[in-house]
Amino acid sequence: MKTRLSSPTVIACLIVLLAVSAVAILKQPTAAAEERTRFEFGSEIEHPFADKAVKEAPFSAQVSLETSQTLANGVHVANKRTGSLYRDSEGRTRQEFLRDGAPENVQINDRVGGVLYNLNMFRHTFGKVNVSTVAVNRELEERKREREHSEREHAEREQMERAKAIGVAHSEKSLEPSRRVESLGVKTYEGVAAEVTRFTVTIPAGMQGNDKAFDIVTERWYSSDLNLLVMAKRTDPRTGEMIYRLSNINRSEPSASLFEPPSDFNVSEEKIEYRRNEK
């Protein structure tokens, strides 16, 4: 039997906002997961610290996610959510989840003690779980998403074949999106060196009912010093622009009190689901 920890509501909302299916990259990720994450950055926003302990690289920073879109009637819609990230020299991490206003959910991963705390800042409660339980849950979620992704691809191929058979669709090759990767070199961002990579996905005409081809462009700024994504930008003509960025990056040691539950918080019962292993 394995356990699965229910994700906070705020994470689920973020996934819907990003409209991506990628989850955290595991120590030995599948090829399909790597390919999707190369062109998307949803998993790096949901799980910026992933599952790897990084020592001797303390920092603190504010993080924000901005989205903007211009509707067909000319109306401009913009939203911004903010949070914070912290890591000490021992690899402990604190993530204050993105929110429009004061943080409601905070996650502390004490890699030294082997425990993870989920804090509700409004209720002044926290849950405590073993870190191995979280790793099991993420692995299980990744398997499920990989299976769903494979099923969707299979269904799309069948639909394409049926369309070709009745002479409605274009050739199979013309309905496959093309992908291009460009290295833009190393640039300085907020005082840290970041490797910049641009990923372009071209959706051909007719693939999604579109009369012309269009591009989805993602730009990723990754800092090897911090082992962290420090900035990302995604432009999609269907959904608008999305910018994720760290700001006010401070490389000094954060306060030790940030990596433990406040003394006036009460322990709450964690909701755990038990399920059989999935293959």
Image (tube, helix red, strand yellow):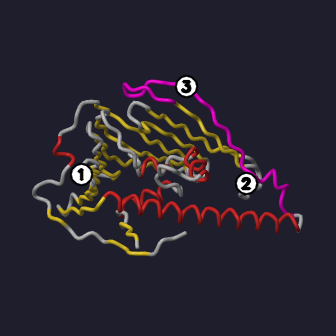
Q: Which amino acid type corresponds to the residue marked 1 in the rendered image?
A: Gly
Q: From the viewer's perspective, is residue 156 above or below residue 181?
A: below
Q: Nearer the viewer, residue 240 or 117?
A: 117
Contact? badges 3 and 2 (CB < 8 Å): no
x then y, percent, for residue 256: 17, 42
Q: Would you say residue 3 is visible in this rendering?
A: yes
In the displayed structure, does residue 23 sit left or right of residue 99?
right
Q: Is residue 31 left or right of residue 69?
A: right
Which residues lie in the magenta part? 168-195
Dot 2 or dot 1, earlier in sequence: 1
Q: Secondary structure at mark 2?
A: loop
Q: Mark 1 = which residue? A: 113
Circle 1 SS class? loop
| Amino acid type, label 3 | Gly
The residue nearer to you, when weighing 249 against 107, is: 107
* Quarter of the image where one finds residue 269: bottom left
| Residue name at image x 43 percent, y 56 percent | 14
If the image is split into quadrants, where does the N terminus sit? bottom left
First along the sequence among labels 3 and 2: 3
Look at discs 2 and 1 and give the one toward the viewer.
1
Q: Nearer the viewer, mark 1 or mark 3?
A: 1
Identify the disc placed on residue 210.
Answer: 2
Give the labeled residue for mark 3. 185
